[in-house]
Image: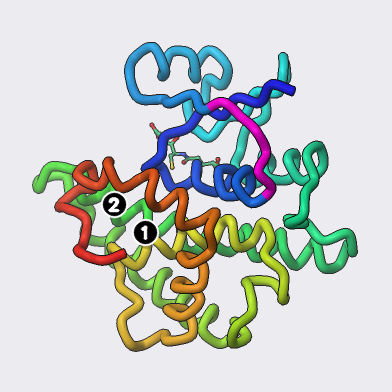
């Protein structure tokens, strides 16, 4: 077996497969995509030029959720990231889409806006992203069962997605006191060893966060 993950420790979408890999202690090599050579190699495999990307021998797998599904099928372990029951698996996939589309996407819009020069800032885009995050936080607050994971009582793909999404979204659009259930869920995620590990591995890069990382976590 020769799994290679092309990733960067600070990149939120890379956390999703990293958490899955750590959950089941799956051996892999880390290909850090940081310098020009790393980017060129990534681009030669996936012209869309986005990571994470997984190589399994000569096979290339892209898209963070697809990588987790691939790992769940090919390298199953104690943590079953997709339930065997099809209806339950569908519910997990739905939550994965929810975190990507309605938490990660607006979170990334806010981060990207911070990276722009003042003259190129997009006030409307920022307002829309904040509105989406408020709606997503509110829906999640009503949805989450106390003490449970994102989709039932087991840790799944949905939680692999939730961890980076909520980790960074709270930095740019704080949960504050309005969403105590989501805040408690975020804390539960951060206490999970696989998640704590990716958070720790990303610490040296916090200086890269535009306008500075907040003094928390
Ligand atoms: N839908 C993709 C999103 C991947 C993505 O946006 N990755 C970011 C890092 S978090 C990236 O590659 N950024 C580099 C760039 O856009 O140049 C997935 O789920 O893998």
Look at the image and say whether residue 27 sits in the magenta stretch. Answer: yes
Where residue 130 appears, x then y in whole percent? 33, 69
Near-viewer residue (130 or 179): 179
User: Magenta segment, principal secondary structure?
Assistant: loop
Label 2: element kind: helix
Near-viewer residue (135 or 120): 135
Residue numbers of the magenta segment: 24-29
Q: CA distance from mark 2 to mark 1?
A: 9 Å
Q: Which circle's residue, 2 or 1, is located before the other in the chain?
A: 2
What residue lies at 72% left-to-right and 14% top-to-bottom?
Answer: 58
Quadrant for residue 177, please give it. Answer: bottom left
Count of number-bearing discs: 2
Query: Residue tagged by mark 1?
Result: 168
Is 33 located above or below residue 202 in the figure? above
Look at the image and say whether residue 192 sits in the magenta stretch. Answer: no
On screen, residue 49 versus residue 55, left or right, reads left
Badge 2, how many Cα within 10 Å: few under 14, some, many 20+?
some
Where residue 51 appears, x then y in whole percent? 50, 33
Query: Residue tagged by mark 2?
Result: 111
What residue lies at 43% left-to-right and 26% top-to-bottom?
Answer: 32
Is 81 located above or below residue 153 in the figure? above
């Amino acid at each position: 077996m020769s799994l290679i993950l092309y990733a960067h420790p600070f990149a939120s979408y890379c956390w999703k497969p990293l958490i899955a890999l750590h959950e089941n202690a799956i051996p892999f090599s880390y290909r850090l995509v940081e310098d020009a050579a790393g980017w060129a190699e990534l681009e030669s495999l996936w012209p869309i030029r986005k990571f994470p990307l997984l190589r399994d021998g000569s096979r290339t797998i892209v898209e963070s959720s697809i990588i987790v599904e691939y790992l769940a099928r090919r390298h199953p372990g104690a943590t079953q990231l997709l339930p065997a029951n099809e209806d339950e698996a569908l519910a997990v996939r739905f939550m994965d889409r929810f975190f990507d589309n309605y938490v990660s996407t607006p979170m990334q819009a806010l981060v990207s806006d911070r990276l722009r020069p003042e003259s190129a800032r997009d006030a409307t885009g920022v307002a829309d992203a904040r509105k989406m995050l408020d709606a997503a936080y509110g829906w999640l607050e009503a949805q989450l069962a106390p003490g449970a994971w994102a989709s039932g009582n087991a840790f799944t793909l949905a939680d692999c997605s939730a961890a980076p999404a909520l980790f960074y979204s709270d930095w740019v659009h704080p949960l504050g006191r309005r969403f105590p259930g989501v805040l408690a869920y975020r804390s539960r995620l951060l206490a999970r060893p696989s998640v704590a590990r990716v958070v720790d591995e990303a610490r040296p890069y916090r200086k890269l966060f535009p306008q500075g990382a907040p003094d928390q976590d």
